Image (tube, helix red, strand yellow):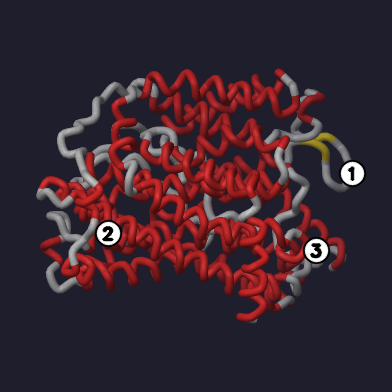
């Protein structure tokens, strides 16, 4: 298996190093780094805006570019957290706890240097994990029938809804709403229209571009537009020479970096967790096992190395279930699955064998992209920080312009523009009511596949529901669903203590000047 993986990876580098693919990889990580620095933008809104632009592209450069935006944004987010005490995106909120105190001590450059090293180590482990683990999962998944696929989709839906940010019940409600939106259109078996209300434009269903741009473009921007806070640039000046950590700092950061990487890679294998949960879990774990926990929150280098390594390991690891099983771990992964579907590629176990250029080219581009990000971040720290002086109200109109142009360009249809605006208003209302919209996209993407395999299973078993329990792999996935539900009940019983712990952390983390962007 190792020799086969190395051979396939060599083929992947051949694909990724083709000039046009390399150009789109560079463009993706550059844009990702840029939106990572800018609060309120984030990879979800950016990928939603870029999604229509990929229509005229080949699948390989399109996926390389969109993926580059995702993991590139994680580098940019760490810069603001450390230098400006500004957690532009949720995964980097924990980095503020020790990153900014280090900056005030004159060690902001050291913290950035450790962050770049931790990010590269975490990403490298996540990529290596994907190289060897994804093909193994594919071999297992090729044995799946409709019942197994249906149960697997149920795990993804349940995990994505119950492990999402906020109340589990609200997460489940949003997932169900996504399922209902996903079945709008013609029935997959009979062709009869469902929930179209006589509108012929809905016979083909709701477009994923309209849903993504409405929920994560318009809604998020509407939620952020009224903020007028300015950014304090007092500690933002850092030179390249300041970014080289000492041997003592590297020694302190080494084992926390390793532990954060391992925790992040484990979190990535659980659908619905994402880098935010990985960073919080790794920071809490590191603080508990530390011999000097009182240093955390006051400038401990371990408090920067551990969550950053965990974040980047989780981001790269998120691609494992997405590419090998067709289960998106979070919102961005659901968007990437949507991009594959737009290009006529069915995500899942057949992806590696039928579209080896996409899978192995993507893995090779991860290595190339992370090296490019290191090269970009070291000399351009000052440029990225300077971008924060741009008022958000100036970014909003241009973003809205690209949203409308992108939706219209997809099918040259003004109905979809109106559809996007309606979805955006609904998404804004949901945000104001504290219903996080991320699970909607998860339900929208996985719902039709769940329905198709559920109906196929019942046709094969002649309506016998016991087929889901009698088949061992399907029963195993259903057992995981039960464990997830029991775990949520346990968390609910411990809720008062958990709320107190969360409030203790929130009292230390500064308030984000713009609304947090969904992962």
Write down the residue under mark 1: 190
Give the percent coordinates (x, y) of residue 498: 29, 57
Give the percent coordinates (x, y) of residue 340: 69, 48
Give the percent coordinates (x, y) of residue 304: 26, 57
Mark 1, Cα crowd under 10 Å, few <14 / some 14-19 / many 20+, is few
Q: Secondary structure at mark 2?
A: helix
Vertically, is 323 above or below 382?
below
Mark 3, Cα crowd under 10 Å, few <14 / some 14-19 / many 20+, is many
Q: Which label's residue is closer to the chain start, 2 or 3?
A: 2
Residue at horizontal 73 percent and vertical 53 percent from the top: 449
Q: Could one spot residue 98 in this view of the protein?
A: yes
Q: Which numbered disc, 1 or 2, marks the residue closer to the eye? A: 2
Write down the residue under mark 2: 114
Mark 1–mark 2 Cα distance, whole angstroms, equals 58 Å
Write down the residue under mark 3: 457
Left or right: where 131 falls relative to 388:
right
Left or right: where 142 falls relative to 75:
right
């Amino acid at each position: 298996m190792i020799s086969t993986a190395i051979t396939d990876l060599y083929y992947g580098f051949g694909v990724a190093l083709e000039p046009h693919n390399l150009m789109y990889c560079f463009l993706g990580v550059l844009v990702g780094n840029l939106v990572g620095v800018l609060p309120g933008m984030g990879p979800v809104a950016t990928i939603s805006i870029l999604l229509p632009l990929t229509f005229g592209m080949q699948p390989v450069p399109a996926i390389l570019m969109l993926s580059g935006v995702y993991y590139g944004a994680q580098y940019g987010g760490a810069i603001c957290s450390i230098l400006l005490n500004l957690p532009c995106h949720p995964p980097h909120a924990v980095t503020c706890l020790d990153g900014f105190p280090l900056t005030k001590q004159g060690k902001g450059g050291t913290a950035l240097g450790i962050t770049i090293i931790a990010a590269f180590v975490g990403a490298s482990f996540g990529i290596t994990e994907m190289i060897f683990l994804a093909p193994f999962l594919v071999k297992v998944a090729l044995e799946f029938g409709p019942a197994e696929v249906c149960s697997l989709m149920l795990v993804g839906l349940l995990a994505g809804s119950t492990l999402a940010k906020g109340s589990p019940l609200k997460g489940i409600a949003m997932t169900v709403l996504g399922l209902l939106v996903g079945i709008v259109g013609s029935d997959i078996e009979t062709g009869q229209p469902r929930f179209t209300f006589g509108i012929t434009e809905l016979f083909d269903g709701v477009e994923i571009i309209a849903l993504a741009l409405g929920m994560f473009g318009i809604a998020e921007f509407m939620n952020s537009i009224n903020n007028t806070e300015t950014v304090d640039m007092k500690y933002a000046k850092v030179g390249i020479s300041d970014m080289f950590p000492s041997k003592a700092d590297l020694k302190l950061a080494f084992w926390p970096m390793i532990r954060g990487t391992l925790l992040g890679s484990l979190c990535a294998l659980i659908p619905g967790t994402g880098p935010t949960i990985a960073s919080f879990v790794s920071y809490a774990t590191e603080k508990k096992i530390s011999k000097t926990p009182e240093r955390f929150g006051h400038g401990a280098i371990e408090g920067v190395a551990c969550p950053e390594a965990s974040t980047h390991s989780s981001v790269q690891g998120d691609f494992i279930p997405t590419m090998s099983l067709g289960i998106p771990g979070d919102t961005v992964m659901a968007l990437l699955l949507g991009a594959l579907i737009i290009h006529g590629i069915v995500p899942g176990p057949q992806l590696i064998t039928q579209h080896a250029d996409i899978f192995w080219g993507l893995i090779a581009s991860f290595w190339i992209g992370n090296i490019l990000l290191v090269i970009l971040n070291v000399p351009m720290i000052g440029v990225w920080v300077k971008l924060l002086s741009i008022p958000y109200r100036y970014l909003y109109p241009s973003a809205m312009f690209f949203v409308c142009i992108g939706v219209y360009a997809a099918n040259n249809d003004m109905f979809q523009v109106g559809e996007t605006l309606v979805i955006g208003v609904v998404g804004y209302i949901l945000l104001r009511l504290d219903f996080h919209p991320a699970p909607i996209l998860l339900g929208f993407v996985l719902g039709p596949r769940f329905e198709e395999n559920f109906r196929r299973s019942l046709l094969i078993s002649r309506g016998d529901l016991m087929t889901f329990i009698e088949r061992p792999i399907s029963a195993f996935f259903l057992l995981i669903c039960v464990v997830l539900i029991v775990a949520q009940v346990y968390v609910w019983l411990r809720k008062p203590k958990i709320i107190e712990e969360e409030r203790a952390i929130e009292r230390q983390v500064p308030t984000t000047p713009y609304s947090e962007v969904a992962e």
